[in-house]
Amino acid sequence: MLGKYSKPAISHLVETALATLDWFPTPKQCLEILSGWRDRDAVEHKHRTAMAASAVRQERQARLGEVLDALYRRALVQEQIDALPDQVKVIGAERGFLRLHDDGVYRARPIPVPTNG
């Protein structure tokens, strides 16, 4: 029942219960104490904001992973490479999928051919 509440809310619950009750509170008493918590809206907003930011980071990471996989497979044509953000091109070059040429253009490196030796 209390798992959805933040650490600050639970801290408020504990402090209030210790100060006002003679015995361990019932779940109903816990919920009553939490309903009067003043900072609830601010903390819940902060929690929702953090969760949304995390979801955005995960989505960006997934998209980057897809692009890097396509670069690894040499599945992008030059127009698609040119359209990539500069930071992604740098990462592609650092991973060995792209090469920055003297004319300032990133191009796909050829797939290495294993040598029998």
Image (cartoon, rainbow, N blue to C red):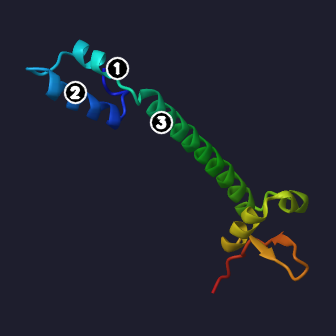
Image x and y of residue 90, in percent: 73, 70
Q: Are marks 1 and 3 in contact (CB under 8 Å)?
A: no
Of callouts 3 and 2, the N-terminal one: 2
Residue behind mark 3: 47
Residue behind mark 2: 16
Q: Amino acid at mark 2?
A: Thr
Is 111 on the left or on the right of 77, as rendered? left
Quadrant of residue 115 within the rendered picture: bottom right
Image x and y of residue 74, in percent: 77, 62
Q: Write the residue at 73% across / 62% down.
A: 88
Q: Write the residue at 60% across / 48% down.
A: 57
Of callouts 2 and 1, the N-terminal one: 2
Q: Secondary structure at mark 1?
A: loop
Quadrant of residue 21 within the rendered picture: top left
Where is the N terminus found, in terms of image quarters? top left
Residue behind mark 1: 36
Is 47 on the left or on the right of 64, as rendered? left
Q: Write the residue at 25% across / 12% down.
A: 28
